Image (cartoon, coloured by chain):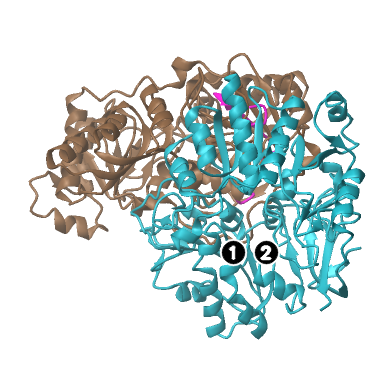
Chain colours: A brown, B cyan
Amino acid sequence: MVPESINGEKQIPYKGVGKHRPEGRKYAPPIATCADYPESGDKRVASLKEALVKSGLKDGMTISTHHHFRNGDLIANQIFDIASELGVKDLRWFPSASFPCHEPMIKHLESGVINRIEGSMNGALGRFASEGNMKGVGVLRSHGGRYQAVQDGEVHIDIAVIAAPAADAFGNANGVHGDAACGLLGFALADSQFADRVIVATDNIVPFPCIPWQIHGNYVDYTVEVDKIGIPEKIISGTTRITKSPDRLRIAELTAEFCDQAGIIQDGFSFQSGAGGTSLAVGEFFANKLRERKIKARFVRAGSNKYLVKMLEEGLTDYILDGQTFDLEGVRSMRDYPNHVNTSPFTSYNYHGKGNFASMLDVVILGATEVDVNFNANVVTHSDGYLLHGIGGWQNCLFGKTVVLPLPLFRDRIPVIVDEVTTITGPGELIDVIITERGIAINPKRTDLIEKLKASDLPIVSIEDLKAEADKICGIPKKPEFTDKVIAVIKWVDGTVIDSVREVKK
Amino acid sequence: MVPESINGEKQIPYKGVGKHRPEGRKYAPPIATCADYPESGDKRVASLKEALVKSGLKDGMTISTHHHFRNGDLIANQIFDIASELGVKDLRWFPSASFPCHEPMIKHLESGVINRIEGSMNGALGRFASEGNMKGVGVLRSHGGRYQAVQDGEVHIDIAVIAAPAADAFGNANGVHGDAACGLLGFALADSQFADRVIVATDNIVPFPCIPWQIHGNYVDYTVEVDKIGIPEKIISGTTRITKSPDRLRIAELTAEFCDQAGIIQDGFSFQSGAGGTSLAVGEFFANKLRERKIKARFVRAGSNKYLVKMLEEGLTDYILDGQTFDLEGVRSMRDYPNHVNTSPFTSYNYHGKGNFASMLDVVILGATEVDVNFNANVVTHSDGYLLHGIGGWQNCLFGKTVVLPLPLFRDRIPVIVDEVTTITGPGELIDVIITERGIAINPKRTDLIEKLKASDLPIVSIEDLKAEADKICGIPKKPEFTDKVIAVIKWVDGTVIDSVREVKK
C-alpha cells in the first residue's frame, strides 16, 4: 500500500517489472544563448553565495548535489547555511546520496530551510526522518531512478551545485585531478544536463580546457573557486578490505563456486560486485578462477578499488566500467588507463533509456538487510524499522542476468530471511539466488539454474529451510511498530512507488 | 532581403550579432523505456532496410546522416535507394554535409523521393540546386547552427542513421577503430540525442563495450552490420599538404607575422587554422615561432592533420581540440593520445548553449570566396552565383577573439574583394583582418589592432585600396544574374536567416 499523493504530487503505484509505460517527453530545459555568457569563457563569480544569489535562489526551490565525496563533502552543508543566512525556506534538497557528514542539515530541516530530502538518508538523517521529524516526505530513488526522474521532469532541479576536484573557469570539470580527486562525476551528469542553473565549485582551477571534461562547461552558468571542497581521507572509503571473518569468507567462496558450477564464469563474461568485505572476497575468488584457467572477463562493473585495478593491470579483464571510485588506486587507474571507463547513471542504469548496460551483466553480487521467502529484498530499512540506507544502484543491478545475494543467515541474532520484508526495495522475481554460510536457496523461477545445479555438491536448500534454520537459532524477533505517518517512499526504477516507510513508534 | 517563410515554415530574419533572443525550451524527445529494448543489449537487425522499416520510414520524414566519411561515404546513398525502392516520397535529407560522392541523390531529388537537402551541397548537388531543380528550398547551417537547430526543435529528425567505424550490438560507437576509421563522430551527436529513431550501421562490430563510446548506445534503437561503410582512401582528405605556391606562402607568412606583431603568439595562446594549403602553412609558421621561443600553445582547435599531431608530439601545444580528423595521423593521434580530444558541435560551436569554446580562441584563420569593403564575407557561393560550398564551422569560428582571412587578391582573374558579396555568410563586424599577397586590411572597428600595428613594417592598407588594386589588375567582372526564385537560405548561428541564394539565370 502506497500513498496516492506525496508532497502535493500525484504518484503512480508500482505495477510490476516492465509494466509501467512512460508517456510524454523528456524534460526540456530552457534554451540558452551565448549572448548571455562571457565570450572569454570566464564564468567565475566571487563566492558560492554570489553564485546562488545570481542563480535566483528562493523559497521552494530544488537544490541538487552529488555524493562523489561521500563522507568528506564540504560543499552541501555550506549551500544550506547560505540559504539559511539569506532567509530562504522550504527547499527540497536533492542529493544523489547523503552521508553522516551531512548531519548539520538537521538544523535546517528543523528550522524550515529544508522541507525534505529526496535521496538516501544514511545515519543520523535517516533516524531523524524515521522518527517523524522531517516536514516533507522523503523520496528514495536508485541511481538510475534519479537520472530517470530528472530526465522525465519528475524532479525539476532549479539549481545544481557540482563540486569538482578540477575545473576550468568555463565550467568543464572532472574528478581525476586535484587534492579532492574522487575519480569521476557521473552522479552529477543529469543535474548538469537538466537543471535550470548549474554552479561548478572547485578548489583546483586549471586553464581551459579542463580535460577530461566529464562535466561540460557548456551546461554551466557559474564557476566558483573555494578553499576546499572535500576532505580527501574521507572521500576515499576506508572500508574496502577483503573480509577476514571465516563465515563471510565461506559465503564468498560458496558464491564463487555457485557461479562457477552454474557456468557463469567463462571467457568474456562480466560481473559486478560491491565494495563490502564479502563482495571483495567474491571478486578475488573470481579473479583466481580466471587466472587459473587463463581466461578473462570482458568487463567488470564497479565501484572500483585496488583489487579490480589489479585485475585490469593483470589482464584479467578488458575493461572496468566504473560508476564511482572507492579508493586512490581506483582514482589513479581511471586517470591513467583508457580501459578504466567512467560511466554515469545514464549509460549504466537509466530505465527510461533505449536500454542500459545493467541488464548485460552475467552476474551481479548484491547485499540486502532482509530477504523474504518470496525473494523480495530490502536494502533501506533495518529490522527495527529505521530508514538508514539508500538504494544506490541496487535496484538497477537487479536487471543483471543472474542476481546473487550472499548474506549471513543472521546479524546480531536477527534473522536476515523473514516472512515479509519491512520495506520492499526490489521484487523477488528479479532475485535469483540467496547464498548463506549455511545453505544456498535458488529462486524457484530459475528452473534453468536448478537444473544446472541438480547434481551439485553445494548445500542447495529451499529458502523456507534457510528461514527455519535461522529462526531455530535466533527465535523470531519482535516486529518493529509504526505509526500511520508515511515518512518516505521508495521509488522503483520506472518512477512508480514500490513501497513506503512509516514513522517508527518509540 | 530574406523570405518570411520557406518550406511552409515561418522564418526569423537576421537581427544582428547576439541580438536574437531564443524563447522556449529545447526539443524534448519521447521518453523511452528499457522494457522495449532487448535485455541482452543486442539491437541488431538483418539489414539497413529492416532498420529503416522498423523505424517507421514514411513520406515526409526527415532523415539525417553525418559526413565524417567525407567523399568516401557509402551509407547515405543506400538509405535513399531503399526509400525509393519502398516508394517513400518527399523526404528531407539532413546531412551534416554532402559531398561529390552523393551525386546519385540527384535522381532521388528528381523523382521526388527527396524534397530537399538541408545541409551543405558541395559540387554537383549545389549546381543542381542553383539551377532551380530542387523541389524544396535548401537550408544551409553552420556545424554549430545544425546542433542548435536540432536542440531547439527547429529541425525534428525522425530517423538518424549513424555510420560508425566501430560499434557494439548495443549501439555504442566510435570513429577511431576499424577500416573506415575517421577519428570521431561528433557531427552525429545531436542526431543521437534528439532523433526519434537512431540506427547505427557498422562494418566492424565489436563485443560490448565499444570504447570509447563517442556515441552512446543508450540513444540507439537499432544496429546493423553492413559489408562496408566507407572507402578509407576517400575518407581521409588527400589535400592536406602545405602550399608550394609562392603567393600563398607569402600570404601565410604575412599572416603569421601579423599575428606575432599583434601580440597574439604568446605562451598559452590558442589558434585554429584550416586544412587548406595556406592555412597549413600558417600553422607551420606559428609552430616555428613557438619552437624558437620555447613557448607553447594551450590548445589548437582542429581539423587535425599530421602537422598538428607533430606539434602535439613535440610539446608545442598542450591539447588538440578536434572536430574532424583530416588524415590518418589525426586518427592515430586521437586514438592514442588523451590530449588529442574529440569534440562536437555541442562543446565547440552551439550558440544556444551556456557559452562554447569558439569564442575563447585567440586567433582563427579562415577562408572565404568573397569579402566586401565592409568586411562581410561569403563562403557558400562563387562569384558566378553558384552555391557550391557549405558553411562548415566557419560562422561559428567568427566568434574567435581575432578573425583573420588570408586570401589571394584574386582567383582566376576574379577579384576576391568586392563592393557587395554575392551571399552574406558572415557579418563584417566579426571579421578583423584580411591578408592578401599585396597588402593587409584591418577592420576599422579593431582600433586596438590598428594602434598596435601602427609602427609596423607590414603592408597595412585600407580594404578600399586592396579592392582598387585588384580591380586595376582584373577589371570589374560582370555580376551573375539571378531569377527571383530562392533556392536556398543561409542561417546564422542563432537560427535566423542571414541571406538567401537565388536561382542562377542561364
* Magenta stretch: includes residue A153: yes
Residue B237 or residue A298, whichever sits in front:
B237
Quick check: B165 left or right of B378? left
Instruction: Give the crowd class for mark 1: few <14, some 14-19, many >=20 residues within 10 Å.
Output: many
Q: Chain of mark 2?
A: B
Please report contact status of discs 1 and 2: CB closer than 8 Å, yes or no: yes
Where residue B315 appears, as percent x and y from the top left, is 51, 27
* Amino acid carrying mark 1 in the image: Asp
Which residue does the numbered mark 2 point to in the structure image? B156
A72 over B242 or under it: above or below: above
Of helix, strand and loop, which one carries label 1? loop
Which residues make up the magenta segment?
A152-171
Which residue does the numbered mark 1 point to in the structure image? B196
Where residue A31 appears, as percent x and y from the top left, is 74, 48
A184 over B267 or under it: above or below: below
Residue A308 or residue B147, whichever sits in front:
B147
Disc on the earlier residue, 1 or 2: 2
The residue at the point 19 percent across, 29 percent down is: A249
Q: From mark 1 to mark 2, how far is it between C-alphas? A: 8 Å
The residue at the point 53 percent across, 54 percent down is: A13
Query: Residue B401 occupies which quadrant of the picture?
Result: top right
* Amino acid carrying mark 2 in the image: His
Of helix, strand and loop, which one carries label 2? loop
Q: Which residue is outermost to the top?
A: A227
Where residue B415 appears, as percent x and y from the top left, is 82, 55
The answer, for residue B326, to whether it is visible in the render is yes
Magenta portion: prevailing SS class: loop
Where residue A500 appears, as percent x and y from the top left, is 51, 43
Quick check: A128 left or right of B148? left
* Magenta stretch: includes residue B400: no
